[in-house]
Amino acid sequence: MRHTEICIDYTALQHNLQRVRQLAPTSQVVAMVKANAYGHGVENVLDAFHDADVFGVACLQEALQIRQLGCNKPITLIEGVFSVEEMPIALANKCECMVHQQQQIDWLLQYKAQYQQANLKVWLKINTGMNRLGFKIQTADDIDAIVQPLLQAGFKCIITMHFANADELQHPLNQQQIQLFKAIQNKYPELQYSCCNSAAIYNWADLHADYVRPGIMLYGASPFADKSCHDLGLKAVMHFNSQIMQIFQVNAGESIGYASSFVADKTMTVAVVAVGYGDGYPRAYQQDNFVNIAGHQVKIIGRISMDMITIDITDIANEVKIGDTVQLWGDKINVDDVAQAYQTIAYELLCRITTRPMRKIINKSTQ
Ligand SMILES: *Cc1c(COP(=O)(O)O)cnc(C)c1O
């Protein structure tokens, strides 16, 4: 069997959620499990996150998957419903809706009685400078026209916003967004509030408010370019492992793989590893990318294929054999470092894992 696996560290998931609790002890936690739990498989994380207060997903289909797994925890659709037809389904499945535009508010009003009977809250998204989703607000007074009709109709509201630069503490837009948010908090102290993703949870303890919305930190990756998961007290959850399937030598002047892009300058020992872009490993060409074999950083050479990569094991040739485990990222090689080498972010690497690697849960105590 081809042992290309995504091992999900159950204890690490629990540890990272505890870390959120430690940082934001008085807030409720919306555990973000959108995009199939950032590529980890939502069915593999729900149980470890049983201590979370709410699950956050991007759309109704993701919420329904959670319900089908037998989970009754509150769910927030962070982009709300996409059509009025989704409203009754959202209601039947007890999903709270974000609203970011007038049409969604009209749909809510159509289903007002059922929504309030189900005791669901409305997450009102305001745009304080991110300029993506939300009602555009220039001053705290601008919110009156949006929130008053909802309150008068009897809805309970949670005012939410999203930072454009939460990972960059000094970015000037942060203060603009924070000031606007705080002004609204002062104007409507009776409402609930939420604005912190992972980076903001670390950066602004005074903004944790009623709900924090951690995503990437729950999976043990860093939201900051200059801080590692260890610096942040997090543990890697996804261990992406494969195995060596062939070992051979090439002579100086021989090339390796597609497009013959790598040419050996000396006699080298090469190993073929059973992983490629068909599993979700990035294909983008870079100079220096590494995998980990038993604690050694080993360099990738030649093109990334769909099902295989080739690595230079010349220096450790007498220590490795066919079948040995190779880690692409995980507890031995940091996904943030791999992402940086490919000029992307851990979020993308985690999400782009395909269905081919086998998934298994590790470090789950059996008691
Ligand atoms: C995805 C998402 C989050 C989580 O962001 P991280 O950077 O992964 O912590 C929080 N809030 C909203 C609205 C999101 O879409």
Image: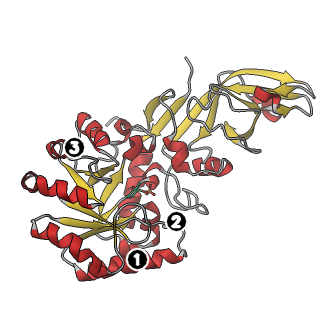
Q: Earlier in the sequence, mark 3 or mark 2?
A: 3
Disc nearest the viewer among 1 and 3: 3
Disc nearest the viewer among 3 and 2: 3
Q: Quadrant of the C terminus?
A: top left
Kind of residue indicated by mark 3: Glu
Q: Left or right: where does residue 345 sit relative to residue 95?
A: right
**At x 17% / y 47%, what residue is drawn?**
94
Give x and y (percent) for residue 185.
28, 78
Q: CA distance from mark 3 to mark 2?
A: 34 Å
Q: Left or right: where does residue 135 sit relative to residue 303?
A: left
Q: Earlier in the sequence, mark 1 or mark 3?
A: 3
Give x and y (percent) for residue 133.
37, 60
Q: Earlier in the sequence, mark 1 or mark 2?
A: 2
* Secondary element type, mark 2: loop
Category of crowding for the residue at label 3, using alpha-carbon neighbours closer than 10 angstroms: few (below 14), some (14–19), many (at least 20): some
Q: Quadrant of the N terminus?
A: top right
Mark 3 sits on what residue? 86
Front-lying residue, 189 or 114: 114
Quarter of the image where ligand 1 sits: bottom left
Kind of residue indicated by mark 1: Ile
Q: Is residue 25 visible?
A: no
Q: Tell me: is circle 2 under 8 Å from ligand 1.
A: yes
Kind of residue indicated by mark 2: Asp
Front-lying residue, 190 or 46: 190
Front-lying residue, 232 or 261: 261
Front-lying residue, 223 or 269: 223
Where 300 sits versus 87, above or below? above
Q: CA distance from mark 1 to mark 2?
A: 14 Å
Mark 2 sits on what residue? 167
Mark 1 sits on what residue? 178
Q: Quadrant of residue 329?
A: top right
